[in-house]
């Protein structure tokens, strides 16, 4: 008899963003004349930077000639891209990361989701609440949690992020072996200071724990005192893995390119307390299960680090941050307390009703899609997330419509 992995039965019926997409599609079907403005899922709207497009075209031409054609590439990415990443994203900020500590992939969602495979079934896992649902759902699938009760899975350690702690969670009171952190945060837009990250790095050392640090939104940081990488913290290279993405940085959501950084020193443990280097495990995993990102896409990503590419990427970020400022100002003027949206493309807004009711109200009365905070966890109840990824015009129109709907 073929039997299923029953952990899947513990999951909510559908993934948060699929659920929202279904509700929006239902609404459109019932209201075919209503134009919808999407400020829900964080999907970019501006095209790839011109420098990336030129490199992309050139690499497609390489594939057309026998001399320059490439077949399978290295699973962990081409050196030309790994070298640039190490130099521009890390060494330029004083983080000692080498090219062979970078694993190029097709998305931070896949990497943050797949990474749990490396760890034992019975480790204690801490996740922030609210949280990007991928961290939780993939651990549910992997059988590391109990059932779902009152908005939480039993067996997980939830780290409350709320207005009292400025959406930067405190250290766990219970043991945690694996800790997921995300800064700038999805969904709250909060950022962590050097001191706050240092506290987590110290915790990981003292408790033989590991931090999975999702930095997919680092390119939106404009305040130079905020660390962009956890490796700016002394000692993090032994206790932290970092996930990055070109999706939001350079508009690669549809093109797919990201990377995971695993310093060679980064360790977990086997048996009673034998250190095992995670770099070797992930290399083994990737060479078995992954055949790398396509050559033209990696060439396009490499162009992000050229002189023009760096300028253009900065402009992309500035464009969405201008939207974020407009959303903060507009929603604030309507009387809703707003968080995030300064060094992040998400604005976390406290509504005056429950999250899904706010979502429904914005969709029905304003034709605007947001993301209900409760979809990110129990602490998200009462909030909605508005994304800055859209045109200036649509953001302005969305705010006008919301203001009208609330009158
Ligand atoms: C989000 O809206 O939270 C993100 O776009 C989802 C993702 O990057 O997978």
Image (tube, rainbow, N blue to C red):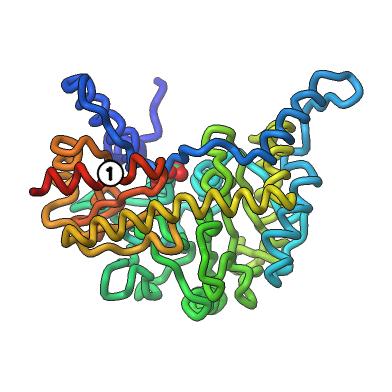
Q: Residue at x 71, y 54 (%)?
A: 85
Nearest to the observer: residue 346 or residue 13: 346
x and y percent of residue 383 in the render?
A: 22, 56
Left or right of 378, for residue 365: left
Q: Is residue 207 visible?
A: no
Nearest to the observer: residue 17 or residue 2: 17
x and y percent of residue 370 in the render?
A: 28, 44
Task: Work out whether 180 lies above or below 68.
Answer: below
Q: Quadrant of residue 202?
A: bottom right
Left or right of 350, for residue 308: right
Q: Secondary structure at mark 1?
A: loop
Q: Residue at x 16, y 21 (%)?
A: 30
Left or right of 22, for residue 46: right
Q: Quadrant of residue 138?
A: top left
Residue tagged by mark 1? Answer: 370
Looking at the image, in which quadrant does ligand 1 appear? top left
x and y percent of residue 97 in the render?
A: 73, 63
Q: Residue at x 33, y 72 (%)?
A: 166
x and y percent of residue 122 in the render?
A: 44, 56
Nearest to the observer: residue 120 or residue 70: 70
Q: Is residue 211 visible?
A: yes
Nearest to the observer: residue 51 or residue 131: 51
């Amino acid at each position: 008899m073929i039997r299923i992995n029953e952990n899947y039965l513990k999951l909510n019926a559908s993934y948060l963003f699929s659920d929202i997409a279904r509700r929006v599609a239902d609404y459109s079907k019932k209201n075919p004349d209503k134009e919808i403005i999407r400020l829900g899922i964080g999907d970019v709207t501006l095209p790839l930077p011109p420098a990336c497009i030129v490199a992309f075209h050139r690499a497609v031409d390489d594939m057309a000639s026998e001399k320059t054609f490439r077949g399978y590439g290295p699973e962990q990415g081409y050196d030309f891209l790994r070298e640039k990443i190490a130099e521009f994203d890390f060494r330029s900020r004083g983080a000692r990361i080498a090219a062979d500590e970078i694993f190029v992939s097709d998305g931070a969602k896949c990497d943050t989701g797949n990474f749990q495979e490396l760890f034992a079934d019975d480790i204690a896992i801490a996740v922030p609440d609210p949280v990007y649902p991928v961290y939780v759902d993939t651990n549910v699938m992997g059988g590391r949690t109990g059932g779902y009760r009152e908005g939480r899975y039993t067996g997980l350690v939830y780290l409350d992020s709320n207005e009292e702690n400025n959406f930067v969670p405190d250290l766990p009171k219970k043991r945690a072996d694996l800790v997921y952190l995300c800064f700038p945060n999805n969904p709250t837009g909060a950022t962590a200071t050097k001191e706050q990250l240092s506290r987590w790095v110290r915790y990981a050392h003292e408790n033989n724990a590991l931090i999975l640090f999702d930095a997919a939104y680092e390119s939106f940081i404009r305040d130079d005192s905020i660390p962009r990488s956890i490796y700016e913290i002394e000692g993090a290279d032994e206790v932290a893995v970092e996930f990055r993405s070109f999706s939001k940085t350079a508009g690669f959501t549809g093109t797919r390119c990201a990377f995971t950084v695993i310093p060679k020193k980064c360790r977990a443990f086997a048996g009673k307390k034998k250190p095992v280097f995670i770099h070797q495990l992930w290399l083994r995993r990737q060479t078995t299960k992954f055949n790398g990102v396509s050559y033209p896409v990696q060439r396009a990503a490499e162009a992000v680090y050229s002189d023009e590419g760096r300028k253009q990427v900065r402009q992309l970020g500035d464009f969405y941050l201008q939207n974020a400022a407009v959303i903060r100002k507009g929603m604030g003027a309507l009387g809703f307390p707003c968080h995030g949206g300064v060094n992040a493309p998400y604005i976390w807004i406290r509504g005056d009703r429950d999250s899904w009711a706010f979502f429904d109200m914005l969709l029905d009365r304003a034709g605007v899609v947001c993301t209900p905070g409760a979809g990110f966890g129990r602490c998200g109840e009462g909030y909605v997330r508005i994304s800055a990824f859209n045109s200036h015009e649509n953001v302005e129109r969305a705010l006008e419509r919301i203001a009208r709907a609330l009158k």
